[in-house]
Image (tube, grey):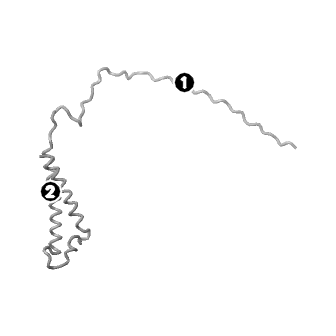
Amino acid sequence: MYIVLIVLTLICAVLLICVVLVQKSKGGGLSSSFAGSNQIMGVRRTNSFIEKLTWGLAGAICLLSILATFSMPKAINANSSRVNATPAEQVVPGDFNTAAPEATPAPAAPAVPAPAVETPAE
């Protein structure tokens, strides 16, 4: 049942994408191709039909999503969960009262003698 609801949701989503792509952002959409007055669906009826179809498909997706949530399969074993893993117990407690290592002094840098200044020979 769950897989059928998911497939129906995907079909409604693809249809909704197609219906939205048919529409134009300013309202011209599919109605612009029905310019003649003696068509089966006139300008006003095309816009209202596409708008109703858009809202109907969006509502169907919402309803199918809620139904799919309630029909999701349950976990087989109540104790096994992928989300809440049981923490491993520590058998031997660790000794956290260890002393810090003693700091050793850094070796002193050797003194560099200043370069000798030479006077030019005349």
The residue at 68%/31% (across/down) is: 111
Q: Nearer the viewer, residue 6 or 86?
A: 6
> Mark 1 belongs to which amino acid?
Thr
The residue at 17%/75% (across/down) is: 43
SS at mark 1 in the image? loop
In percent of width and height, residue 26 lies at: 26, 70
Which numbered mark, 1 or 2, is in the foreground of this view?
Answer: 2
SS at mark 2 in the image? helix
Q: Nearer the viewer, residue 105 or 2?
A: 2
The answer to whether 100 is drawn above or below residue 67 in the figure is above
The answer to whether 32 is drawn above or below residue 56 in the figure is below
Quickly name the residue at label 2: 60
Q: Nearer the viewer, residue 113 or 22?
A: 22
Label 1: how many Cα within 10 Å (few below 14, some 14–19, many 20+): few
Question: Image quadrant of residue 116?
Answer: top right
In percent of width and height, residue 44 lies at: 16, 74
Q: Residue furthest right?
A: 122
> Mark 2 belongs to which amino acid?
Ala
Tell whether label 2 touches label 1 (CB within 8 Å): no
Among the two numbered marks 1 and 2 on one chain, the one whose residue lies closer to the N terminus: 2
In percent of width and height, residue 64 lies at: 14, 52
Residue 104: image tag: 1
The residue at 18%/79% (across/down) is: 36
Residue 62: image tag: none
Side of 103 where 76 appears, left or right: left
The residue at 17%/49% (across/down) is: 6
